[in-house]
Amino acid sequence: MAIEINKEVSTGTVEQRMVYESGNEMAAYAAHQINYHVMGYFPISPSTEVAQFLDLMKANGQHDIKLIPSDGEHGSAGICYGASAAGGRVFNATSSNGYLYMLEQMPVQSGTRFPMVMNLVCRSVSGPLDIHGDHSDLYFALNTGWPILMCRDPQAVYDMNIIALKLAEDPEVRLPVLVASDGYFTSHQKRRVQTFAHRADVHAFVGEHSPEGFKHVLDRNNPITVGPYMNEPDYINNCYQQSMAMYKASEVFDRIRQEYAALTGRDYPILDQYRMDDAEVAVFLMNSASEIIKDVVDQLRARGIKAGSVAPNIIRPFPAKEIAEALRGVKAVTVGDRADSYGGHGGNMTNEIKAALFTHGAKDTLVISRIYGLGGKDFYAEDGHHLFELAIEAANAGKVDVPFDYWGHTPGDPEKAPKRVLEPLRYEDLKTGLITVDRDEATGKLKVKVPPVRQLTKKPKRLAPGHGACPGCGIFSGLELFFKGIEGDIVALYQTGCAMVVTTGFPYSSHKATYIHNLFQNGAATLSGVVEMFWERKRRGELDQYGLKDDFTFVMITGDGGMDIGMGPAIGSALRNHKMIILEYDNEGYMNTGAQLSYSTPLGHRTSTSNVGKHQGGKLFHHKDTAQIMAATNIPYVFTGSESLPQDLLRKAAKAQYYAQNVGLVYGKILISCPLNWLSEEKIGQTLIDEAVNTCFFPMYEVEEGVTTITYNPEDKGKRIPLGDWLKNMGKTKHMTRPEYAEALKSFEDEVERRWQRLKAKHENMYL
């Protein structure tokens, strides 16, 4: 679409300035101007940047928002709900399955009438996994009781975020508000955007925060009960009041947008109509595609076809009457839904538009439904012409031949079905006999025999080369070394993360054995189900036909923060003691989404959500000791490992397999380097791992049937080095060696020493 600068530059009564930014940047910019009290968040693409930009501004002292990194989206929703109930202004941003993970919290917040603003940066919902933009997550939001504002471009993202807060806090509404934009189309693409030049003008528009206007939990003189148990008559009354507030939101939004238009010169009517005055055929689209279709309308008008387009700026409450009026004289309209309501003979917007037309007496307009743009599939002018052709054909024929279909999908060709590229691993190659583990009947201890690594080089790799990992990535060298210690067949489950994403780009896979993926938080529970089904089907004799020579070893691979969001299911699996291995590759962050902090990120380390600036020096709290947490569940075997001690890791892998096949759950943690996000040279990855071990930051030990043993003590070897020697070699931690961060470095050193001394005490006393 050609840019007309006179339309891009709005005039109003308030001073404005022009910036060139993306939708995510503008959501963060609006939030920082509002200066919310609290943002609870969890990283998920493509919304992650919102928190990143706010953290960077926080490090530079540009706002006072308390940014709280949660353990998962469900936790972030709880943080936001609690903060809202405590009377403050609250903000969040999420996408896709992250939104679904917090979904049960959404009706709680709207049902108890606590306002906040959340950006939903729309993305495909798994499965299978796709991280690009469509509206499949947005459609889950329709029944949560949140007003939903729509954003076609970065300018709208900025404006709607400011309008949203005023709408949420209006006394006649008092509801949390969702601001929806298209992932990667709007979230990452930069455009000219006009903003308020002064924060004071933003505050003057939204109104200064005044918690006295509604009840909250911090007023000791007026204690309240939040979310009480209700019986039927009270509950239906509560729902009725919420419903009335939702419909009132439409009227309030209309009033607010007119106020905003007077200030800025930018107007967002409930329904954006383009050349609809005398339109005979129309297309209904939402958000980014609704701008592209306007070019198509102009092209059709030039050919004498009376075309027009309709796009809503708010879909909850649904503008049913406005849509019916806009389409009353239209012969046929094609409704494009960027998500399917499977089995509903049309997407959600199609069916709501049909209901609106019927309800308001516009029964002569023919409606054609097409599902388009799923998984981020681009929408071009040619696609718009096709949607209009459907409407033109229906208008001319006076009927709709195919009321519902997909557009843009590719018919399958049986001759082009994916064929196996990698040959399955042979059991005979995997069962070398070089590794043996037996239990000494006299002492009860395991006797492990592991050959030198060079004798295992002929053992085939379980992952094929040619995957898409970054240069210098330590994940796969670490995993392959561990797998060298595993004999026989495995079934592997990978949680979402770098190791998963870079090895499974459809239709190809780097995995030579059976591979499963489930969502970020639920890998351990999923593999638990696989494990128990294996043992049950084996008991019933149902697996004899598959020629298993030994039992499978079941391994879950997690990393990239997966033991934050996935900690609950992992502990549940540990307490149930399923026969499986959980192996965590620790790269100290959410590297697959752009290096945000995780709970395994150490104190002071720089990430994209723990920036370094004059007001902040990296991560503000200490790293989680996952191995000790899992040891506290009393599982039979816990270990830490490192490529820097290959023989040690091989021994632990062999032990892990024995316990996982004979006793119960095993947890292991290996430290791996991430040159891209550690801001270090690729060639020193191994050195960094060695140094992390020799500083005692990442100690080598095992907890076998409750007894802790340090398997490598750098002090005994005369190899212990100061933490600073390790930190100075990484760009993410180089700042910690400067004098102004001496206090943070001292705190980090003290914590590492405290944990090391405690570990030595456990090593010396079998009862600790």
Image (spheres, grey):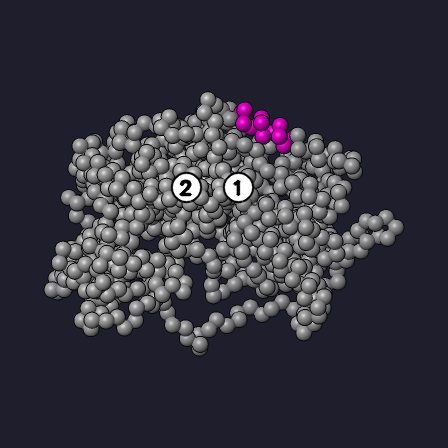
Q: Is residue 413 magenta?
A: no
Q: Residues within 10 Å of mark 1 (few under 14, many from 20)?
A: many
Judging depth in this view, the residue of 684 and 667 nearest the camera is: 667
Q: Is residue 752 magenta?
A: yes
Q: Looking at the rendering, which quadrant does residue 90 occupy?
A: top left
Horizontal side of residue 194 vs 345, given as left or right: left
Q: Residue at x 68, y 70 (%)?
A: 542
Q: Is residue 731 visible?
A: no
N-terminal-most mark, 1 or 2: 1
Horizontal side of residue 676 vs 362, given as left or right: right
Horizontal side of residue 82 vs 476, given as left or right: left
Q: Residue at x 33, y 32 (%)?
A: 34
Q: Which residue is mark 2?
A: 238
User: Which disc, if any, is residue 613?
Assistant: none
Quadrant of the rendering where the C terminus is positioned:
top right
User: Which disc, if any, is residue 71?
Assistant: 1
Q: Looking at the rendering, which quadrant does residue 350 occupy?
A: bottom left
Q: Is residue 159 above or below residue 417?
A: above
Q: Looking at the rendering, which quadrant does residue 493 occupy?
A: bottom right
Q: Amino acid at mark 2?
A: Asn
Q: Is residue 289 above or below residue 90?
A: below
Secondary structure, mark 1, is: loop
Q: Amino acid at mark 1?
A: Asp
